[in-house]
């Protein structure tokens, strides 16, 4: 058994975690910067980088102390090396490089999306490759086939906004503050999902891609019309999002009807309405449905450590001069 330290700092969560190659989360710390960014209605890169720089080193010390481990006890140090806000990514990657160099432990540079893509296997040891993955977060909206560690086939992506971004913008329009996803979901519980006529962009198109910019604009028009209450707008928006996801999945997975499991990952996977719609879709298509526990859906370091453990098991690591990548498609 090996132990991997994981570091995440690509957006507004600073996190460190120790995960074993036999799927135990030994210790973890996570600090959200929500309060720092809330006055600006979104993540401010400069503030994020500074907060990561302040919080990360004590967090790493804390997880090591809690586990009673020295750096030299580690089998690898894995850090998010992109994609994300470059200042924050550099804080985490440079810290990992320094620790790796000082303790002579291998460095593993992780693509943040790979962390999300493999996280369901941390929670579920029975999840084998290949599986279909719907990755829905603040920055990404993709359908992939995960064929193995490092083997990702992208079937669909968004041509404008990511779904999490659409939730965040809807929240802003409705005056719900930041981060928006959980607030929209809560308000939607009190609304009528059939009340506000909203578009389903790209639904019916033969290409499986996503588009959410038009949906967001329609939400703005609905709000400005003053014809509808906020709860009905939130519920109708969420229903439109569900309809888009299901239609796009149908088109993307049509030619791949031998894939045994549908997995959802990324922050939007925390949404219960979306989860249960996906669960129904999977069972209608004779696929197993797998969703990681909520804490593993949003950004965290255990998923980065686990991606490191998977790469370590397949004999991979990275040189200490690995350069951070603000853009890095899977
Ligand atoms: O994966 P994540 O933590 O960070 C990125 O890599 O983007 O995802 C954050 C996104 C935000 O846009 C947030 O509003 C959304 O996930 N989100 C949700 C919910 N919880 C988080 N969206 C809808 N419903 C939720 N319950
Ligand atoms: Zn993420």
Image (cartoon, helix red, strand yellow):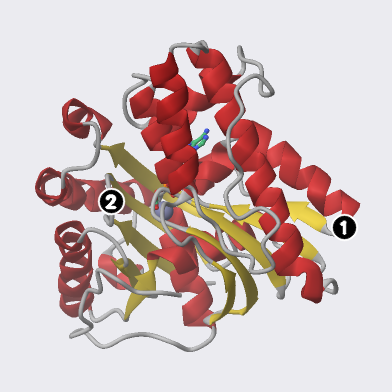
Measured as percent of width and height from the top left, residue 184 is found at: 49, 25
Which residue is painted at 14% across and 60% down in the image?
Answer: 87
113 relative to 166, above or below: below
Measured as percent of width and height from the top left, residue 33 is found at: 24, 36
Measured as percent of width and height from the top left, residue 59 is found at: 24, 47
Horizontal side of 253 relative to 148 (left or right) equals right
Which residue is painted at 64% across and 65% down in the image?
Answer: 208
Instruction: Using a 10 Å C-alpha cutoff, classify the residue at mark 1 as few (fewer than 14 neighbours), some (14 to 19) or many (20 or more).
Output: some
Which residue is label 1 attached to? 285
Residue sitting nearer the eye, 142 or 10? 142
171 relative to 118, above or below: above
Measured as percent of width and height from the top left, residue 152 is found at: 57, 78
Which residue is painted at 52% across and 81% down in the image?
Answer: 150
Q: From this viewpoint, is residue 221 visible?
A: yes
Residue sitting nearer the eye, 111 or 63? 111
Residue 83's quadrant in the figure?
bottom left
Task: Respond yes or no on whether mark 2 lies under 8 Å from ligand 1.
Answer: yes
Which mark sits nearer the N-terminus, 2 or 1? 2
Q: From this viewpoint, is residue 259 visible?
A: no
Residue 236's quadrant in the figure?
top right
The quarter of the rendered structure image containing the N terminus is bottom right
Residue sitting nearer the eye, 62 or 317? 317
Instruction: Using a 10 Å C-alpha cutoff, classify the residue at mark 2 as few (fewer than 14 neighbours), some (14 to 19) or many (20 or more).
Output: many
Res. 11 mark? 2
Q: Secondary structure at mark 1?
A: loop
Horizontal side of 249 relative to 259 (left or right) equals left
316 relative to 300, above or below: below
Which residue is painted at 30% across and 68% down in the image?
Answer: 82
Q: Secondary structure at mark 2?
A: loop
- Judged from the image, the quadrant occupied by ligand 1 is top left
Res. 221 mark? none
């Amino acid at each position: 058994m090996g132990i991997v330290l994981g570091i995440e700092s690509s957006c507004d969560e600073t996190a460190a975690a120790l995960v074993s190659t036999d799927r135990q989360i030994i210790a973890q710390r996570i600090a959200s910067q929500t309060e720092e960014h809330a006055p600006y209605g979104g993540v401010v890169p400069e503030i994020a980088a500074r907060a990561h720089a302040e919080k990360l080193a004590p967090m790493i010390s804390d997880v090591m102390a809690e586990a009673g481990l020295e750096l030299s006890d580690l089998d690898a140090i894995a850090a998010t090396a992109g994609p994300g806000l470059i200042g924050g990514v550099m804080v985490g990657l440079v810290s990992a490089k320094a620790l790796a160099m000082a303790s002579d432990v291998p460095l593993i540079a992780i693509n943040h999306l790979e962390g999300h893509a493999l996280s369901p296997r941390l929670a579920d040891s029975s999840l084998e490759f290949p599986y279909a993955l719907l990755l829905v977060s603040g920055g990404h909206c993709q359908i992939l086939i995960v064929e193995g560690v490092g083997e990702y086939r992208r079937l669909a992506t968004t041509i404008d906004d990511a779904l999490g971004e659409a939730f965040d913008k809807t929240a802003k329009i409705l005056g719900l503050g930041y981060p928006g996803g959980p607030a929209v979901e809560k308000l939607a519980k009190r609304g009528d999902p059939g009340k506000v006529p909203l578009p389903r962009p790209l639904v019916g198109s033969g290409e499986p891609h996503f588009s959410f910019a038009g949906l967001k604009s329609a939400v703005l028009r609905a709000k400005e019309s003053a014809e509808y209450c906020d709860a009905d707008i939130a519920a109708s928006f969420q229903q439109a999002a569900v309809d888009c996801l299901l239609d796009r999945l149908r088109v993307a997975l049509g030619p791949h009807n031998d894939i045994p499991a549908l997995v959802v990952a990324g922050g939007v996977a925390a949404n219960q309405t979306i989860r249960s719609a996906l669960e129904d879709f999977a069972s209608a298509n004779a696929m197993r449905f797998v969703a990681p526990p909520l804490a593993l859906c949003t950004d965290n370091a255990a998923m980065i450590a686990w991606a490191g453990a998977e790469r370590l098991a397949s004999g991979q690591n990275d040189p200490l001069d690995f350069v951070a990548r603000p853009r890095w498609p899977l």
